[in-house]
Image (cartoon, helix red, strand yellow):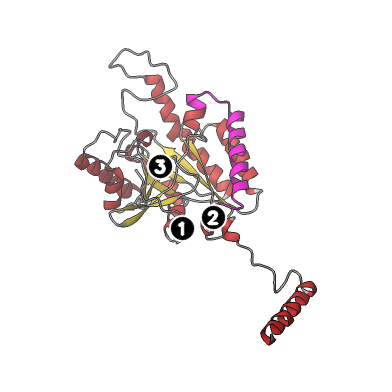
Amino acid sequence: MSTRKNFLKTASVLGASTLLFPKTVFSQPKVSNAIQPERSKWSDGTRLVISVSMQFEAGGEPEIGFDSPFPANLEKGYKDLPAKTWFTYGYKEGISRMLDLWDKHNVKVTSHIIGGAAKKSPDLAREIVKRGHELSGHGLYWTPEYNMGYDDEKKFIQDSVDLIKSITGQTTVGYNCNWLRRSPNTIKILQELGFLYHIDDLSRDEPFLIPVDGKKFVVVPYTLRCNDILLLEGRNFTSTQFLETLKLEFDQLYKEGATKRRMMSFSAHDRISGTPTQVNVMDQFITYALQHPGVKFMRKDEIARMTINDRTSLIDSDYR
């Protein structure tokens, strides 16, 4: 009986306390992890990371048999001389114009550079490094890798690393295959050669980790949605449409960035985005993006290091 009286007395005190302090001591704690997972935001508090790929390919293209805006109606074996000038524009005009744009906004980018392009324009390759940008591997020449054997591909990648380092002093830690088409051995080779990440992936809107031979390797996803060579050259978008695409992509990812770890990527090829029109477009977009709090433009090697050092980063153990 006394036990029952003590229980009722205690219950009445608790009830009164709840009435006096309805939302303090006795309220249930919020379970925020169900709504906002721990891995949802960047470790440094950034809301949206933007990654720019500046492809430096001019001078690394083959003499015969390459993609260009010109119709493929030449007889076999003949050089497409006008198309070669389209590539030449990349190192004579495009890269320098984009470098000035990045400087204007204090934005640092990753330049996926073909070894042959660095050899053709060594001063320009060194200028990219001098201005604080990252050089990423993009093959020794503009050559497919998906059909290479293990030893041939490893030499192909290593030779590009050695060539770029000999010209610029920078060792590449990221890699981008020709048209993203890697072989089954590419990632294993990259890990063996000391690379940190690759970008030949479209599967997510955030970087993530994969296990390679018992070690962590970073995937920093690329884009076709915001890719100048696909949209402007491949689908004949206008520059105005491209700008609208960048803004729409940004708006959605920025919104998602409130509760998820998000990264936006866009691509700028030397001979395409280095034109006056496209530099104007990117200038407008960067200005627009930087008006939003919590937005940061980052090099891909910086993104990869932040990802691999963050215990909350996503790990894809079934990656293929």
Residue that appears at 62% across and 33% down: 244
| Nearer mark to the viewer, of 2 and 3 | 2
Residue that appears at 49% across and 48% down: 206
What distance separates the C-alpha of mark 2 from that of mark 1?
Answer: 14 Å
Q: Pinpoint residue 250: horizontal percent, then vertical percent.
A: 60, 42
**Amino acid under label 3?**
His
Question: Judging from the image, what secondary structure is the residue with disc 2 in?
Answer: helix
Question: Judging from the image, what secondary structure is the residue with disc 3 in?
Answer: strand
The quadrant where residue 151 appears: top left
Label 2 packing within 10 angstroms: few (<14), some (14-19), many (20+): many
**Residue that lies at the very extreme toward the left in this rendered image:** 151
Looking at the rendering, the stretch of residues picked out in magenta corresponds to 232-260
* Residue at image mark 2: 40
* Residue at image mark 1: 306
Tag 1 or tag 2, which sits nearer the N-term? 2
Depth check, front residue: 255 or 55: 255
What distance separates the C-alpha of mark 2 from that of mark 3?
Answer: 28 Å
In this rendering, position of residue 306 left or right of residue 157: right
**Amino acid under label 1?**
Met
